[in-house]
Image (spheres, grey):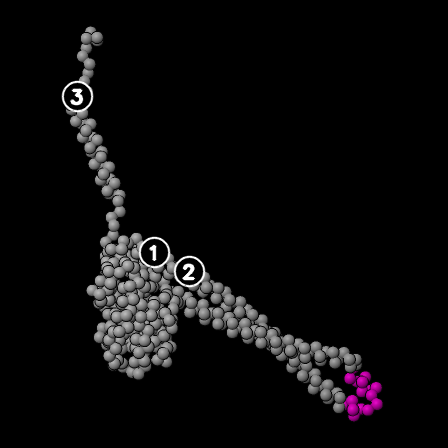
Amino acid sequence: MAAHRKPRQSPLGGQAGRTAATLALASAATATLFEGSGHAEPRPTTAQVKEKVDRLYEEAEVATERYNGAKEKADEARAAFERLRDEAARRTQRLNTARDGLGAMAAAQYRSGGLDPAVQLALTSNPDQYLERAALAERAGERQAAAVSAVRRELAAVRQLRAESTGRLDTLRGHETELRRQKAAVLGKLQAARTVLARLTAEERARYEAAEAGRDGSGASAGNSAAGGTGTAAAPATARADRSSGGDRAPVTAPNGRAAEAVSFARAQLGKPYVWGATGPSAFDCSGLTQAAWRAAGVSLPRTTYTQINAGRRVSRSQLAPGDLVFFYSGISHVGLYIGGGQMIHAPRPGAPVRVAPIDEMPFAGATRVG
């Protein structure tokens, strides 16, 4: 019976089986195709690249201002340490001189034999001469007591100065550690921005430079320069610097002479490069430029954006006058010098020289009048 039983057929045998296998293979291939497509990273648009680079530059500027603040504190701590060290050296010299004086007095006493005054009077053949010498010795004893007191004072002062110097040195080392940390943060952000830009093709880089130039209100010529040039950042940046240098130089109607001097100084810096941490004369960062401009007008400003904003009287945007400091971003990480007409002079970021720009190109955070 079993030998005559028909073999059992698969429900997917024959043509149906081959069709199912074909469909399965096609489905697997389609799934693989879509899976590969799903994992492929889409190339960012020019707008996305610009947004990412702008964010990195903003973060670099935040770190730059923190670096500037750490450097200012480190410089102050170093100067205080040097003053204490110099004062300790002067005090030590005085201490050594006082000790030498005491040594001379002790030697003189030893040579005199140190006899009791009553015995010396009994043995002398000239009592008048002895009494005169005794009076001199008494005065010498007073001088010796004063010298001993002077030594004690100088010794205490030297010990205190050395203890203060040790404290200042510890403070200095702490600020220098922070300085190195912020420097590494700045360099890391700038390198990240360069890496993003280096991935662009020549055509993409040209579009990016055109978008950057358009933000400065000079899009057409800068864009044409980028498209027709080598595709690097240098040509558009130079073009922007030249246009900024030859911009509007109408007389400044400033609230006072010092504000006018600050604006005049800033105009003379147009086209100079941005270098983080720089305060001139050949390069500037944003707060370095405003500090230098007002220094030229005889006003001392602190070093960083977040201290400069408190260096004068706050004014509203509607009250802005040439010479006012204008600040941007929620962290007060950028500053420019207002020149009127909604324009400012500022040092934007690496690759963008000191130039005239509208204050609307960044999120406005406040303004201060220092003149």
Extreme top residue here?
A: 1
**Other residues around mark 1 within 10 Å, as few (<14) / some (14–19) / many (≥20):** some
Along the viewing direction, whichever of 136 and 223 lies nearer the viewer: 223
Q: Which of marks 2 and 1 is in front?
A: 1
Extreme left residue here?
A: 15
Q: Is residue 170 magenta?
A: no
- Residue visible at 68% across and 84% down? 142
Along the viewing direction, whichever of 212 and 115 lies nearer the viewer: 212
Q: Can you tell which mark lies on residue 368?
A: none
Q: Picture coordinates of residue 166 (x, y %)?
A: 53, 67
Q: Nearer the viewer, mark 2 or mark 3?
A: 3
Name the amino acid type tagged 2: Arg
> Mark 2 highlights which residue?
181
> Mark 1 highlights which residue?
192
> Mark 3 highlights which residue?
14
> Could you say which quadrant of the image residue 177 lies in?
bottom left
Please tell me which of labels 2 and 1 falls first in the chain. 2
Q: What stretch of residues is rendered in magenta?
A: 116-131
Name the amino acid type tagged 3: Gly
Q: Is residue 255 at all visible to an observer of this figure?
A: yes
Q: Picture coordinates of residue 147 (x, y %)?
A: 65, 80
Q: Is residue 312 at all visible to an observer of this figure?
A: no
The CA distance from mark 1 to mark 3 is 61 Å
Q: Are marks 1 and 3 in contact (CB under 8 Å)?
A: no
The local secondary structure at tag 1 comes to helix
Q: How many marks?
A: 3
The local secondary structure at tag 3 comes to helix
Please tell me which of labels 2 and 3 falls first in the chain. 3
Q: Picture coordinates of residue 106 (x, y %)?
A: 72, 78
- Residue visible at 71% across and 79% down? 104
